[in-house]
Amino acid sequence: MNTKQQHTLGAPIIEMAGVNKWYGQFQVLTGIDLSVRAGERIVVCGPSGSGKSTLIRCINRLETVQQGTITVDGIELTAGGKNVDRVRAEVGMVFQQFNLFPHLTILENCTLAPMRSRGMTQQQAEEVAMQYLTRVRIPEQAKKYPAQLSGGQQQRVAIARALCMAPKIMLFDEPTSALDPEMVKEVLDTMIALAEDGMTMLCVTHEMGFARSVADRVIFMAEGRIVEQGAPTQFFDHPQHEKTRQFLGQIL
């Protein structure tokens, strides 16, 4: 599949400079310098334990860093305080697990945050929610509860829920890894449609077909460092680093 279209990238919207992070004595991120432009689609890959998920979780401060600066849409996240809330309002995140509230309907899951954080009325929030549930092709599930949906449907709800906050940036942390194989495509198709709309996206994934067809840039991490990065054709066809070649040899 090759759905990539030429699109114009904007000014940098995420800047990570000299980022280091430790869990106790273990350094999980080392010397991370990363600039992401508005509208850029980035796939982050690498072996288990390489720091991929930690990297993107730092972008909305689900993880804090001990050294370095992270700036998102002009707001320095590492300054803490109200800046964290301001950034989180602009950054949507989809996890491995769907994290839907089981006691709320699909529609209620999608309207909760816009009503609380954006000050929308229930009617406004429901209109927005239905727009995005339609976007991910499950509007007919609005009145159901999460347990009544398949894993792939629940993950699409999670994507719709994040979009209801009108984020400037979407982060995906291995969004298909908890799904049965037959459900992976429906979630990837949803993400491809988002990418084609110009959403700034960072996605941690092992789905290399998605990376090849959608990403503007592929970042390879190992042992907490960015080892290699480049356009998909360069990354897959002419990897420069031995660790990259070993990784690709194992998964392709």
Image (spheres, rainbow, N blue to C red):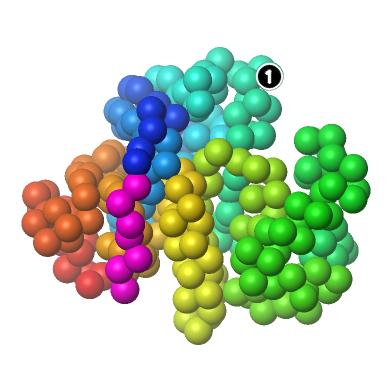
Q: Is residue 22 left or right of residue 63?
A: left
Q: Nearer the viewer, residue 92 or 28?
A: 92
Q: In the current view of this chain or complex, which residue is farthest to the bottom?
A: 182
For residue 131, what is the image quadrant?
A: bottom right
Q: Nearer the viewer, residue 40 or 202?
A: 40
The answer to whether residue 162 is above or below residue 34 is below
- What main secondary structure does the magenta stretch of the protein show? loop
Q: In the current view of this chain or complex, which residue is farthest to the right?
A: 122
Residue sitting at 45 percent across and 63 percent down? 192
Disc 1 target residue: 82
For residue 135, what is the image quadrant?
A: bottom right
Q: Is residue 171 left or right of residue 140?
A: left
Range covered by the magenta-colored residues: 1-7
For residue 238, what is the image quadrant?
A: bottom left
Locate the C terminus and report the quarter of the image it occupies: bottom left
Residue 127 visible somewhere in the drawing = yes
- Mark 1 surroundings within 10 Å by alpha-carbon count, few (fewer than 14), some (14 through 19), many (20 or more): few
The answer to whether residue 174 is above or below residue 76 is below
The answer to whether residue 41 is above or below residue 251 is above
Locate the N terminus and report the quarter of the image it occupies: bottom left
Q: Amino acid at mark 1?
A: Lys
Residue sitting at 49 percent across and 62 percent down? 193
